[in-house]
């Protein structure tokens, strides 16, 4: 690489590169850009949130850049579901799913170059947890539209052999064709043992929420054997994914399996709180082997998950004269943390490689300048290059902002009939939100399912 800078023309190219590189980088919209949408969501005005998102996207500076289209359709689809616009929600979520599949196909063929380009310059590919919950919420969309088979199609995308859950642990498997070493092992060898975070296997390969919904939908279709298998899979999810399912196994699962003859089961799902979001953090890394002291310390700008604490700690349902509490089934925030953890190591590795290549180039340029002009001129080159590099770097903090944090379930066996149903979201003894459904028909031998949400 040193020969590259032995001509004045080539050396000038380095400065041109430093100048134009910042123009090639575009960050995702910062959290403040979503202020009006977040305010509507916080007030439980989901129709207003959809309207504000649509208006913001039509403005001269759209809130979601073209490369962030997956984010757009995810957020829009979720908000439309909460607002009860199930048909448009299905369209939005299906478009997000289609684009995620395309992005994954592209990533397989991207090769090594994908490791040296800042992620913010590329199309947002979606996160694994987003791809999973697309199908969960779209299944609910289909059920709300009276299409049980459509709901089962969405759930099968997750639970079938070689489905999304089955494939989850197989991703991010780069192998060097010569040594057979993983990319992480190669970089660890270069960086020195223990200097970079190591990846870990995903401890999430089975969603209790997806399995529970599948069991309910199979029961509705009269397929009791498949329903039995899915109910067993709910329990298996708790046993095999300890990092996610640390809460007690809900008694409502067994109750939903055994409805007394002549009675009708009312099932309720409650979604509460907002899931974690990404923010940027600076992690310091040391490169003692460079000649210029300007490159001995590197600031890695990396994404980290930040919790958005919910005030809701209890959900109570009344149906006629009956009153019951919902139980936690799936900590969706824990799913997000678990699936993000495996990708984090790859993000660090990409940042390491990208920074290393930039610093090597600039270090050679600084050394050539020191030799031909003066050490002070060489240091000036190094400092200018470092400043340019840091200006071009930013963490990729893109993700859906409106996934719930927790999913609760419960139910009650009732004589068939019509009931006024109210889902109450509490913080201690204080009522936060009330979702009322009047004259709900509860029938025997079919699925009676209500889902309600409060993102406060």
Image: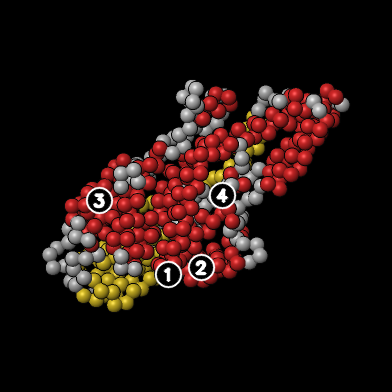
Q: Secondary structure at mark 4?
A: loop
Marks 4 and 2, Cα distance to the nearest angstrom? 23 Å
Name which quarter of the figure residue 358 lies in: top right
The label on residue 50 is: 2
Distance from Cα at disc 1 to Cα at disc 2: 10 Å
Residue 183 in sight from this viewpoint: yes
Q: Earlier in the sequence, mark 1 or mark 2?
A: 2
Work out how far the residue at label 3 is from the one at label 4, CA to CA, in angstroms: 36 Å
Numbered disc 2: secondary structure:
helix
Q: Residues within 10 Å of mark 4 (few under 14, many from 20)?
A: some
Task: Name the residue rendered at 69%, 29% in the picture.
Answer: 360
Give me the disc on residue 85.
1
Locate residue 234 relative to residue 105 in the image: left or right: left
Figure disc tally: 4
Decide: marks 1, 2 in contact (CB < 8 A)?
yes
Compare marks 3 and 2 and give the one earlier in the sequence.
Answer: 2
Asked if residue 438 is positioned above or below residue 168 in the image, the reply reads below
Looking at marks 4 and 1 on the same chain, the residue that comes earlier in the sequence is marked by: 1
From the viewer's perspective, tell me whether residue 210 is left or right of residue 12.
left
Q: Which mark is residue 123?
A: 4
Q: Residues within 10 Å of mark 2 (few under 14, many from 20)?
A: many
| Residues marked 4 and 2 touching at CB (< 8 Å) | no
The foreground one among 256 and 144 is 144
Comparing marks 4 and 1, which lies closer to the viewer? Answer: 4
Label drawn at residue 328: none
Sequence-wise, the earlier of marks 3 and 4 is 4
Q: Earlier in the sequence, mark 3 or mark 1?
A: 1
Q: How far separated are the C-alphas under marks 3 and 1?
A: 28 Å
> Looking at the picture, how far across and down is residue 180, in whole percent?
46, 24
Q: Secondary structure at mark 1?
A: loop
Q: In the image, residue 454 lies at what x, y percent?
A: 43, 64
């Amino acid at each position: 690489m040193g020969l590259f800078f032995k001509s004045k023309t080539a050396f000038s190219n380095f400065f041109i590169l430093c100048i134009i590189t910042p123009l090639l980088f575009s960050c995702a919209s910062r959290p403040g850009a979503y202020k009006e949408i977040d305010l509507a969501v916080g007030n439980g005005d989901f129709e207003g949130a959809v309207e504000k998102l649509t208006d913001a996207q039509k403005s001269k500076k759209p809130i979601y850049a073209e490369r962030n289209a997956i984010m757009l359709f995810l957020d829009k689809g979720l908000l439309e579901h909460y607002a009860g616009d199930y048909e448009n929600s299905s369209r939005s979520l299906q478009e997000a799913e289609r684009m995620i599949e395309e992005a994954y196909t592209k990533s397989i063929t991207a090769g090594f170059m994908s490791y040296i380009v800042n992620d913010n310059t590329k199309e947002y590919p979606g996160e694994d947890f987003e791809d999973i919950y697309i199908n969960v919420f779209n299944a609910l969309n289909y059920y709300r539209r009276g299409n049980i088979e459509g709901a089962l199609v969405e759930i099968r995308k997750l639970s079938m052999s070689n489905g999304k859950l089955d494939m989850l642990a197989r991703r991010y498997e780069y192998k060097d064709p010569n040594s057979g070493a993983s990319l992480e092992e190669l970089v660890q060898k270069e960086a020195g043992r223990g200097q970079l975070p190591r990846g870990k296997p995903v401890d999430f390969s089975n969603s209790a929420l997806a399995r529970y919904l599948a069991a309910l939908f199979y029961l509705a279709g009269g397929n009791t054997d498949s329903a039995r298998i899915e109910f067993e899979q709910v329990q298996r999810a708790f046993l095999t994914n300890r990092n996610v399912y640390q809460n007690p196994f809900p008694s409502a699962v067994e109750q939903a399996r055994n409805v007394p003859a002549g009675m009708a089961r009312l099932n309720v799902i409650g979604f509460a709180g907002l899931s974690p979001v990404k923010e940027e953090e600076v992690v310091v890394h040391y490169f003692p082997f460079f000649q210029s002291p300007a490159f001995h310390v590197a600031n890695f700008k990396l994404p980290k998950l930040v919790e958005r604490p919910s005030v809701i700690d209890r959900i109570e349902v009344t149906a006629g004269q009956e009153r019951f509490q919902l139980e936690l089934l799936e900590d969706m925030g824990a799913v997000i943390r678990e699936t993000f953890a495996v990708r984090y190591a790859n993000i660090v590795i990409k940042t390491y490689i990208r920074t290393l290549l930039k610093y090597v180039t600039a270090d050679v340029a600084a050394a050539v300048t020191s030799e031909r002009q003066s050490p002070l001129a060489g240091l000036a080159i190094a400092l200018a290059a470092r400043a340019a590099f840091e200006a071009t770097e930013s963490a990729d903090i893109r993700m859906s902002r409106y996934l719930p944090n927790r999913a609760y379930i419960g139910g009650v066996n009732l004589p068939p009939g019509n009931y006024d149903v109210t889902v109450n979201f509490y913080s201690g003894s204080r009522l936060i939100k009330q979702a009322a459904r009047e004259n709900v028909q509860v029938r025997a031998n079919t699925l009676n399912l209500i889902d309600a949400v409060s993102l406060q």
